[in-house]
Amino acid sequence: MYNFFVNDECRQGDRYIITGADHNHIKNVLRMKVGDTILVSANGKSDLCEIETIDNDEIIAPIIEEDYQNTELPLEIHLFQGLPKSDKMELIIQKAVELGVYSITPIEMKRCIIKLDDKKKKSKQARWQAISESAAKQSKRNTIPEINEIISYKAALNAAKELDLLLVPYENEDGILSTKEALKELKNAKSVGIIIGPEGGFDEGEIDAAKDAGGRIISLGKRILRTETAAITSVGMCMLYTEMSENE
């Protein structure tokens, strides 16, 4: 079933009026028909709707069932990702959104290889937000995770201080015990931040700063992971632990 994100203004009573790009996609790309069902997501909720009319400018879709499904985690996972090279950020965003991340903030760190000027930063952010929306539709999310503007490492730590827990996967951390203990804290947390280093890893000074900010230094196992693998593993680990703990 296809999922479409709309503004609150698109809802009129017990139906949605769909226009613009989504109207074109439904009518001319997907070639959907009257009677087909779709998910319409607005304001963090997804309603099951049935297409009633398809006109030249709008589609009318009455609501069959409100709050049809909730795919959001009770835990807000905020990923702070050291800027990777090439198109790795696109992969990270796509998979992290599928896994349930709440927001993603690209950060500039000492060992980042890629350097972007202000113009490129804005174009990259717009591109990344579009990828987030596409992944949210595919994975039937109720919301589209925000891809924030690129910030400094110091700013990322300041933002993370507002969260209940901050996890910092570090390749030089020995043993998995610290990870197991940190995950237990997710049960009582509403929000968690995860900071992932770039290809070159963390500078030692960055690890010290993370500790000073209350970060929990953890291990992701005995193997050295690429930055994109570390990001996906960390978000997936928090997602799975949260999902398993919901009914305990």
Image (tube, rainbow, N blue to C red):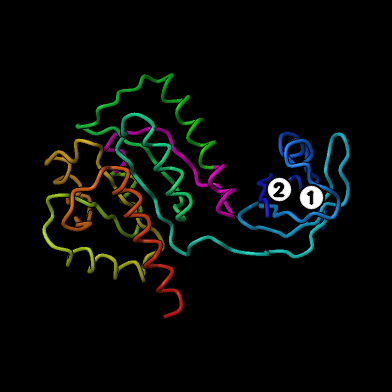
Q: Quadrant of residue 114?
A: top left
Left or right side of 244 for 208: left
For the C terminus, the quadrant is bottom left
Picture residue at 23% right of the left edge, 47% below the top = 225
Picture residue at 44% right of the left edge, 52% below the top = 101
Q: In whole angstroms, how far apart are the C-alphas of marks 2 and 1?
A: 9 Å
Determine whether 82 is above or below 160 in the image. Answer: above
Q: Looking at the image, which is closer to me, 197 or 214? A: 197
Q: Looking at the image, which is closer to me, 220 or 81? A: 220
* Secondary structure beneath label 1: strand
Picture residue at 83% right of the left edge, 56% below the top = 62
Left or right side of 39 for 157: left
Front tag of 2 and 1: 1
Three-letter code for the amino acid on which mark 1 is drawn: Tyr
**Of the numbered discs in the image, which one, if any, rests on residue 8?**
2
Judging by the rendered image, the residue that carries numbered circle 1 is 16
Tell me residue 63's x, y (percent). 79, 59
Tell me residue 160's x, y (percent). 32, 49
Determine whether 139 is above or below 54 in the image. Answer: below
Tell me residue 234's x, y (percent). 32, 55
Q: Which residues are magenta?
A: 133-156
Badge 2 crowding class, 10 Å Cα cut-off, few under 14, some 14 to 19, many 20 or more, is: few
Specify whether residue 135 is painted magenta.
yes
Specify whether residue 224 is painted magenta.
no
